[in-house]
Image (cartoon, rainbow, N blue to C red):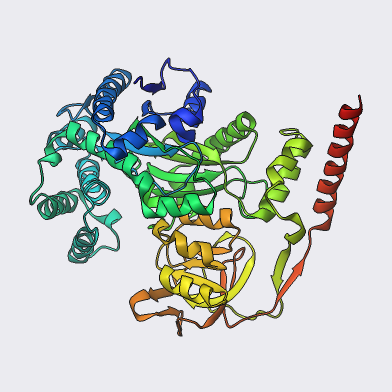
């Protein structure tokens, strides 16, 4: 089973059906000359056999990983698990069609104690090294070992309290080393020494990523999106670049256009001194534009150039994951952006006007959208909101408050519209997303996986509402000074991020001019088809 190499002199393009859409796009970006860390891919065809535990597939997995690591060592000049110049890798999923956040990822694989010493030697940054170590322990324990993440999360919270800081980003190197040691003590009881075996970490992480194909959330998502025909996921192993090395580094997600409204300007979320999962998981609220401009003054222009290049190359709005390492921009992923139906209409028209696509292609992209039902919404006499967050997906919805997916499904089964209100944006709630009329979270970013799913489903979504405190176990939440309980009516405005108490009147209008242009394309397309048939 040959692996696929990405980066360096490897410019061959491969089908998404073989190596997954994520890796196929990664290879295309590398061929365009964009800054892509080198990577290799284990193909989709291994997925079913690894899940079934077939011996031949296990041998192919081990052989592929060995060959791939040799390639990455040559491409980076580093050695996997080394005590001087260590190579750390990410292990990522990737099906032929995008499934944002539904499959597993493990970062910092290979971060043994020897590699920690090597990182400190190579970078002079003990905090970076110990942060990578504790992140590996947290990610590997949950994703690969299937351990409850709560004890590790509690240990982080306890240390933050002891150090009298606001978040883990403020922990110094000594505190981070202590955290890694305490977390190691929690997970190493009964372990098979994986903490000090880089090859064992890699093999187990790759196997876990393949097996995540059969997770409940992944199966639910495929059913919702009619993707049951897909054969599995590939596994991409990529050299790590570090966004968690200080305030000249960070991790982010950028859209080349606003995926909620379709407006033709980039939408960027960046968390400084962070790794990618901090952003897409929705666990952290992004830094402000002013903070980013001070820390990375050249980033906006450089990222804008990359986004334009990707739109030209792919002919569509792009959703890009990136890392900044000591001021250097690295592109980790691009894909066609999930968008609301309203944004899809505007984007299709704009791309035709800009000459990126033809009207026939625009009609194909709009084929699954019910244009007759497409409306723009506004509130009549809204008054003051009870709380305000970050608008992540446009439109307006009113419904009964639910604080977990099970409650949302119960209310929806009774014929009630539901607003799902959660502390964070977890893709484990995908069944709740499917029945909800709208989604609100206390933390998170416009670019988190759950916000992407909300846009794809055409649901209004608000994230980062710091004034909302949700207590799912007590079936209640607090919006500013007001307490609401499960079943209370709330109204949300996805564009502005405003949340109102009660069931407000929603006024709808239709984007008649844009719909008329699409109707004209359709007539011209039909006339062209008839002309060809009669010729």
- In the rendering, at what x and y percent does residue 73 appear? 27, 21
Q: Is 289 left or right of 327, judged from the image as shown?
A: right
The quadrant in which the N terminus is found is top left
Vertical position of residue 441 compared to residue 52: above or below: below
Q: Tell which of 325 and 361 is nearer to you.
A: 361
Vertical position of residue 201 compared to residue 395: above or below: above
Vertical position of residue 181 compared to residue 316: above or below: below
Q: How many marks?
A: 0
- In the rendering, at what x and y percent does residue 63 appear? 25, 23
Q: Is 490 left or right of 51, judged from the image as shown?
A: right
Residue at image x 35%, y 31%? 46
Residue at image x 36%, y 35%? 47
- In the rendering, at what x and y percent does residue 466 appear? 44, 69
Vertical position of residue 289 compared to residue 209: above or below: below
The quadrant in which the C terminus is found is top right
Residue at image x 29%, y 24%? 64
Q: Quadrant of residue 416?
A: bottom right
- In the rendering, at what x and y percent does residue 290 appear? 49, 53
Q: Quadrant of residue 76?
A: top left
For this orientation, the residue located farthest to the left is 190
Visible in this render: residue 209?
yes
Residue at image x 32%, y 36%? 90
Q: Tell which of 271 and 94 is nearer to you.
A: 94
Visible in this render: residue 262?
no
């Amino acid at each position: 089973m040959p692996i696929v190499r990405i980066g360096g002199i490897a410019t061959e393009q491969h089908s998404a059906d073989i190596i997954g859409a994520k890796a196929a796009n990664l290879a295309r970006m590398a061929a365009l000359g964009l800054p892509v860390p080198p990577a290799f891919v284990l193909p989709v065809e291994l997925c079913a056999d690894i899940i079934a535990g077939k011996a031949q597939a296990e041998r192919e997995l081990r052989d592929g990983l060995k060959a791939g690591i040799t390639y990455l060592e040559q491409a980076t000049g580093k050695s996997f698990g080394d005590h001087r110049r260590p190579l750390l890798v990410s292990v990522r999923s990737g099906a032929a069609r995008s499934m944002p956040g539904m499959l597993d990822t493990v970062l910092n694989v290979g971060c043994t104690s020897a590699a920690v010493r090597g990182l400190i030697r190579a970078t002079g940054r003990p905090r970076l090294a110990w942060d990578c170590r504790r992140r590996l322990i947290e990610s590997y324990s949950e994703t690969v070992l299937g351990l409850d993440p709560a004890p590790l999360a509690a240990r982080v919270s306890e240390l933050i309290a002891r150090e009298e800081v606001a978040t883990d980003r403020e922990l110094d190197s000594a505190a981070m080393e202590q955290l890694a040691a305490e977390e190691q003590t929690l997970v190493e009881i009964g372990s098979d020494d994986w903490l000090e075996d880089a090859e064992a970490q890699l093999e187990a992480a790759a196997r876990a990523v393949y097996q995540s194909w059969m997770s409940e959330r992944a199966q639910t998502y495929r059913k919702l999106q009619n993707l049951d025909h897909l054969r599995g996921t590939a596994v991409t192993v990529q050299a790590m670049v570090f966004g968690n090395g200080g305030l000249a580094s960070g991790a982010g997600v950028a859209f080349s256009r606003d995926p909620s409204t379709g407006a033709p300007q980039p939408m960027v979320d960046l968390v400084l001194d962070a790794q990618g999962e901090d952003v897409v998981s929705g666990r952290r609220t992004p830094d402000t534009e002013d903070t980013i401009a001070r820390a990375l003054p050249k980033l906006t222009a450089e990222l804008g150039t990359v986004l334009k290049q990707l739109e030209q190359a792919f002919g569509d709005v792009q959703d890009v994951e990136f890392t900044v390492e000591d001021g250097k921009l690295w592109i980790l992923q691009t894909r066609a952006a999930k968008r609301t139906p309203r944004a899809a209409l505007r984007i299709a028209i704009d791309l035709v006007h800009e000459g990126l696509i033809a009207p026939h292609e625009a009609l194909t992209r709009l084929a699954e959208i019910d244009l007759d039902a497409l409306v723009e919404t506004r509130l009549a006499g809204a008054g003051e909101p009870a709380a305000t967050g970050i608008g992540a997906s446009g439109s307006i919805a009113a419904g009964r408050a639910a604080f977990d997916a099970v409650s949302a499904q119960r209310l929806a089964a009774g014929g009630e519209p539901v607003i799902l209100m959660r502390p964070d944006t977890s893709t484990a709630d995908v069944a709740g997303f499917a029945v909800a009329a709208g989604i609100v979270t206390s933390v998170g970013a416009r670019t988190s996986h759950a916000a992407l799913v909300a846009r794809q489903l055409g649901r209004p979504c608000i994230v980062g509402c710091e004034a909302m405190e949700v207590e799912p176990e007590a079936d209640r939440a607090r919006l500013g000074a007001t307490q609401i309980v499960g079943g209370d009516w709330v109204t949300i405005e996805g564009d502005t991020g405003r949340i109102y108490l009660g069931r407000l009147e929603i006024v709808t209008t239709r984007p008649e001019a844009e719909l008329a242009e699409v109707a004209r394309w359709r007539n011209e397309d039909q006339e062209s088809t008839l002309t060809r048939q009669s010729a």
